[in-house]
Amino acid sequence: MATRLEPLTAGHVLELAEPLPLDSGRSLAGVRIAYETYGTLNPDASNAILICHALTGDQHVASPHPITGKPGWWIRMVGPGKPIDTDRFFVICANVIGSCMGSSGPASPADDGRPWGMRFPVITIRDMVRAQVALVDALGIAKLHAVVGGSMGGMQALSWAANFGDRIDAALVIASTSRHSAQNIAFHEVGRQAIMADPAWAGGDYYSADGSDPRKSGPEAGLAVARMAAHITYLSEQGLTEKFGRRLQDRPDGSKGAKTFGFDADFQVESYLRYQGLSFTDRFDANSYLYITRAMDYFDLAEEAGGKLADAFAGTRARFCLVSFDTDWLYPTGESRTIAHALNAQGLPVSFVELSAPYGHDSFLLDVPELDRVVAGFLQ
């Protein structure tokens, strides 16, 4: 039975004919991978770029989100004449397995027709990449011009280089790391516990029997708190201070900057975080948040290579570009420098740059013109 490519609303879906082997020792049958493409694949299939999304991202990198209606999450970077130029390149972006935008995940139906819930196998970054390899194969692409990703997307790009290094010519890794620190894991655990402490989580079995949207029947309060905690790590103190400082909210009664002497959102930063948390529940599944954060926490390229990070890249001849930001305290510049040293130890061509931006970890998604120049220059 051949792998089948089928149309999907606002995109496409790949259904794998064979079970996908997982790092846990299990395999996952009936895997579906939702994806988008932009541009045209040239006759020798040599102009393909795979973009890997971050934790709460999706395949809609340069097209409107079907739930929120918002523009693609990297529309400033991907498109005709943009740094990732779709007049030149065939761009692919796939929703990772474990997520909730069409690829197989906890909300997907299992063999019994019921949503997987917590029966879904725990997956890793390498498992996500295996699914992407299957997609690239199905599209008839033997070797990618480049794999590009920021944050968790950068982890996937590194995993491509480490595990399928002969399938890529280049890897562009932005604001990422080769493994999670104890602090990274700690922040994720706070989010997971917030979700699981919500009574509506119900052990992960909160999906409606009528098949209605799980985002409207699950642990919205817990997921919102998880998002709030994580969102703080994506920002910088400088950015928060400039945007909000200690300014108070204007009250509905028209009073300006008044304290309520209660526990409403008195400060503007409180209101901002609450908005970020609540709006997130409209587009994301709580169980997917559990699974994807666990995959990120398990990621450790040195461990996969027997303890030495340089050995992880022994099987590739790709060239690399590593980008960090000076205000990113989630994955600070030292993380990228460690990767650069490992690549140098293998004699691989690597460019490394730290850019200045006030936005913290989220800088790779925001208006940083110097990043545009780095991306465009590297991909040429």
Image (cartoon, helix red, strand yellow):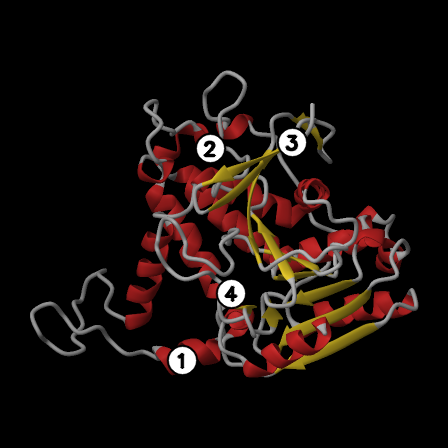
Q: State the mark number for residue 107.
A: 2
The residue labelled by disc 3 is 16
Within-10-Å neighbours for mark 4: few <14, some 14–19, many 20+:
some
Q: Earlier in the sequence, mark 2 or mark 1?
A: 2
For badge 1, the amino acid type reads Thr
Q: Residue at x 55, y 82 (%)?
A: 369
Q: Residue at x 36, y 27 (%)?
A: 211
The residue labelled by disc 1 is 241
Q: Earlier in the sequence, mark 2 or mark 3?
A: 3
Q: Earlier in the sequence, mark 4 or mark 3?
A: 3
Disc 4 element? loop
Disc 1 element? helix
For badge 4, the amino acid type reads Trp
Tags 1 and 4 in contact by the CB under 8 Å rule?
A: no
For badge 2, the amino acid type reads Ala
**Residue 147 placed where, x, y %?**
70, 59
